[in-house]
Image (spheres, helix red, strand yellow):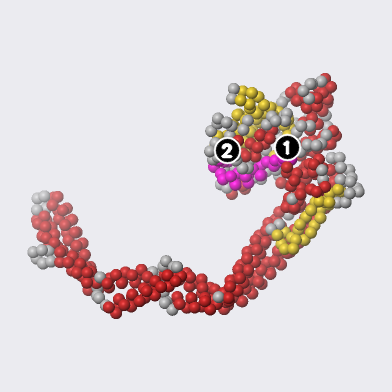
């Protein structure tokens, strides 16, 4: 649950710090005081899209931070998977957005990606705003409701894995058939192009080897001359030999090493240089013997290189390696033409087997959903009757999809009628705004336990409701708020506001820095005044005070 919320420099909020309680709480405040701003900040903290425009004028950045208690909500696996520190009694989630638009997110002071923050946020708080009632017309949402209530998540996971395998096999099968057909249309061209490269019997790195050999053959005389010259400079006879000079210098220094210690080290270095240069001379001499000029070999190398260059130009290839890659590609296409039928047949057999398994799991999923639909019909009808819809009818209509989808082979539609006369029709098409709100609240109450959602926030879900129905909706939210779940309702109705165990008021105030939105927890006397004002308006009457006290005194009565 959300224990504490801190907001700095977000829209009209300069500084807001508030502690929240468990159970059922209510938030009230006049229209325009900033309740939607408060929800926007919470949503952004939980990973929704950030907006630099929400940074308060004059500030460098806005910060929204929440402290959560995670006890009893099985969230440790998320922290382990994302390598985050886990403290079930105190989890700190923070989002920062600068005026430049840069966004940063942290969980327990560890930087996280927005996608990670959003995943965690979806598990921490479910925010229901009025526009979410439109989800009731969304077929995926309806299917998700049935899956949540069915307790068959493992079946759905098995189906999802099989579906991914099936789709991958189908894609591969379609690819093989397509490439085989394309190959057959271009078979003569493929075989000719492949044969042209294969006849050269190329190997990787051959071009570089040939180019180096060609350069040596073209400049054989120059290379030999340079090598001979270098050898003669180092070892060109008794009088001009650098090697002899090094050896003699080393011997001369060695003779005085008994009297001058430094001479010994220098003599050793000269000896080392003598050995190295002598080895260089031997190496150059051996290479001179290997350098030969052969017009026949030069012609062969030039012709070979010319053939390689022609193929590279023809196929826009930059190297022999690219030509070999093209050959491998064409070889695979030719092999598919010659032997593809067997490979395709095997893959068709494998795909059919996967489809059979997929269909079996899909049938199990359908059965679980129909059981869930029967329970949903019974339970939601019972709830909605208490919410002022005694004659309603509710059904879940199933149709089979033409092909398996990512969620199974079922398409569902929630059918609804508010009376005993009108025919059942899709819920989103016939339910009024007030009816949609009550249906959604009933659904939320049914799925809350299954999802183990720590916190639910309802943003004016009671809009368009009044009187005894308002109290009944409040009672339902009150029951949803329990020791390990937190329910917060933003409301304009005194009947709902009086049922909260805790009551918070959002208000505006003028400061030196301009208009600011803030929130405060109300004590008993302040609650009486706030609820009285919600009933009577600006002019408070004694009757309003008495009615407010009565509502508050009755809040524990179910």
Percent x, y for residue 118? 62, 45
Q: Nearest the camera: 441 or 317?
A: 317
* Magenta region: 103-130
Query: Which residue is located at x 57 percent, y 78 percent?
Result: 338
Disc on res. 459: 1
Number of the front mark, 2 or 1: 2
Specify which label sits upstream in the sequence, 2 or 1: 2
Q: From the viewer's perspective, is residue 103 above or below residue 206?
A: above
Task: Report the residue at 11% width, 56% height from top.
Answer: 254
Q: Is residue 31 magenta?
A: no
Q: Residue furthest right?
A: 421
Label 2, label 1: how far apart the Cα atoms are = 24 Å
Callout 1 crowding tier (Cα within 10 Å): few <14, some 14–19, many ≥20: many
Query: In the figure, 319 relative to 74: above or below?
Result: below
Secondary structure under the numbered disc 1 in the rendered image = strand
Label disc, if present, on residue 52 of the rendered structure: 2
Residue at image point 17% right, 53% down: 265
Within the magenta stretch, is there residue 108?
Answer: yes
Q: Position of residue 165 (x, y in %)?
A: 64, 63
The answer to whether 58 is drawn above or below residue 351 in the figure is above
């Amino acid at each position: 649950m959300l224990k504490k919320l801190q907001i700095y420099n977000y829209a009209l909020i300069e500084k807001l710090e508030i502690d929240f309680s468990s159970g059922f709480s209510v938030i009230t405040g006049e229209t325009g005081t900033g309740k939607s701003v408060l929800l926007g900040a919470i949503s952004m903290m939980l990973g929704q899209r950030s907006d630099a425009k929400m940074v308060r004028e004059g500030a460098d950045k806005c910060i929204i931070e929440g402290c959560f208690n995670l006890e009893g909500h099985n969230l440790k696996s998320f922290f382990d998977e994302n390598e985050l520190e886990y403290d079930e009694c105190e989890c700190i989630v923070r989002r920062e957005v600068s005026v430049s638009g840069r966004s940063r997110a942290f969980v327990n002071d560890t930087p996280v990606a927005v996608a990670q923050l959003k995943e965690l946020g979806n598990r921490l708080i479910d925010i229901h705003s009025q526009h979410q009632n439109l989800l009731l017309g969304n077929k995926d949402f309806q299917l998700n409701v049935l899956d949540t209530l069915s307790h068959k998540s493992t079946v759905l996971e098995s189906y999802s894995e099989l579906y991914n395998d099936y789709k991958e096999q189908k894609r591969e099968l379609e690819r093989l058939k397509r490439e085989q057909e394309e190959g057959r249309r271009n078979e003569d061209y493929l075989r000719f192009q492949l044969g042209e490269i294969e006849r050269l019997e190329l190997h990787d790195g051959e071009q570089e080897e040939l180019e180096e050999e060609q350069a040596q053959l073209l400049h054989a005389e120059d290379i030999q001359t340079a090598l001979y010259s270098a050898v003669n400079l180092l070892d060109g006879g008794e009088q001009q030999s650098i090697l002899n000079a090094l050896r003699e210098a080393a011997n001369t220094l060695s003779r005085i090493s008994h009297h001058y210690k430094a001479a010994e080290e220098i003599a050793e270095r000269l000896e080392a240089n003598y050995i190295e240069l002598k080895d260089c001379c031997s190496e150059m001499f051996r290479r001179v013997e290997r350098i030969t000029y052969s017009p026949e070999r030069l012609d062969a190398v030039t012709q070979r290189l010319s053939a390689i260059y022609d193929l590279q130009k023809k196929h826009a290839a930059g190297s022999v390696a690219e030509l070999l890659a093209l050959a491998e590609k064409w070889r695979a296409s030719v092999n598919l033409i010659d032997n593809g039928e067997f490979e395709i047949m095997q893959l068709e057999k494998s795909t059919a087997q996967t489809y059979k398994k997929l269909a079996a799991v899909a049938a199990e999923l359908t059965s679980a959903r129909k059981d869930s639909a029967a329970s949903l019909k019974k339970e939601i009808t019972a709830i909605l009757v208490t919410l002022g819809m005694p004659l309603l009818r509710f059904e879940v209509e199933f149709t089979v999809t033409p092909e398996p989808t990512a969620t199974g082979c079922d398409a569902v539609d929630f059918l609804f009628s508010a009376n005993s006369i009108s025919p059942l029709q899709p819920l989103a098409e016939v339910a009024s705004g007030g009816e949609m709100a009550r249906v959604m609240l009933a659904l939320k109450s049914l799925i809350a336990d299954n999802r183990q959602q720590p916190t639910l926030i309802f943003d004016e879900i009671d809009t368009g409701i009044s009187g005894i129905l308002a109290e009944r909706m409040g009672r339902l939210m009150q029951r949803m708020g329990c020791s390990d779940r937190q329910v917060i309702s933003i409301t304009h109705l005194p009947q709902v506001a009086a049922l909260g165990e805790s009551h918070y008021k959002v208000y505006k105030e003028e400061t030196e820095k301009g208009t600011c939105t803030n929130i405060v927890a109300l004590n008993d006397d302040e609650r009486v005044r706030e609820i009285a004002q919600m009933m009577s308006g600006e002019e408070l009457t004694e009757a309003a005070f008495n009615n407010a006290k009565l509502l508050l005194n009755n809040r524990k009565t179910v």
